[in-house]
Amino acid sequence: MLKAYLAALALAVSGTCLAQANVGEVMKQGGTKMTKEELQQLHAGGVTMKGTLNNGTPYSQQNKADGTVGGVGGNNNEFTLSGTWKIDDTGKYCHDIASSGGIKANTCNSVYKAGSKFFVTTTPTDTPETAVRERQFVK
């Protein structure tokens, strides 16, 4: 019984995640790539970005107005995050962060918006096949 429930739950969750698996799917749902100005406005005064890592681990990252990052990650917030963030001249969101758990990320990625949802590319490329991950931005 438990195995059947877990299998059904995994299938339901995977179907939800696949709704916007890449840039092309986001665009089909009316999504657009955010401009440098839109990203600067979104981050004005600082913003918290929430989401999951590629392995499904949740995190909450505070992008502070001074360009620094603080935050926590893990199912029980067992890791701390620190580093820096910026919006580069091409309009990509960039961060250079490290976690106390040993994860490091130094990337610049595009941000797309479809309705009230935000999606960040998982690589610096912007083709329709480029994978995206949903993110929440909270003031």
Image (spheres, rainbow, N blue to C red):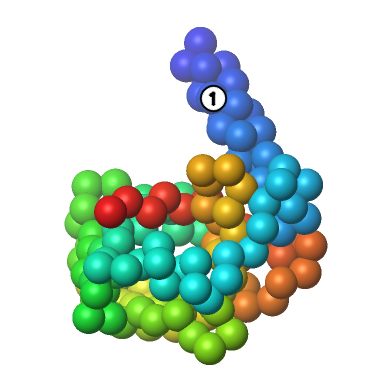
- Which residue is at a point 28% across and 81% down the rendered structure image? 67
Residue 34 visible: yes
Closer to the camera in the image, 126 or 101: 126
Whether residue 79 sits left or right of residue 37 in the image: it is: left
Place of residue 81 in the rendered image (x, y in percent of width and height, measured from the top left): 25, 70
* Amino acid at the residue labelled 1: Leu
Query: What number of labels is visible?
Result: 1
Check the picture and name the quadrant holding the C terminus: bottom left
Q: Nearer the viewer, residue 120 or 43?
A: 43
Residue receiving disc 1: 9
Give above or below for 19 relative to 135. above
The image quarter containing residue 14 is top right
Residue 113: horizontal and vertical position, in percent? 58, 54
Look at the image and tell me whether residue 81 can be seen: no
Within 10 Å of the Cα at label 1, are there few (<14), some (14-19), or many (20+) other Cα atoms?
few
**Residue at the (68%, 40%) spot, across then down:** 19
The residue furthest bottom is: 89
Query: Position of 139 compared to 40: left or right?
Result: left
Secondary structure under the numbered disc 1 in the rendered image = helix
- For residue 80, above or below residue 85: above
Q: Nearer the viewer, residue 14 or 39?
A: 39
At a point 24% along the width and 60% down the height, the residue shown is: 72
Residue 61: x and y, percent?
Answer: 30, 62
The answer to whether 91 appears left or right of 45 in the picture is right
Q: In x, y percent, where is residue 45?
A: 25, 68
Relative height, residue 13 to residue 8 (above, below): below
In the image shown, does 87 or 2 lie closer to the viewer? 87
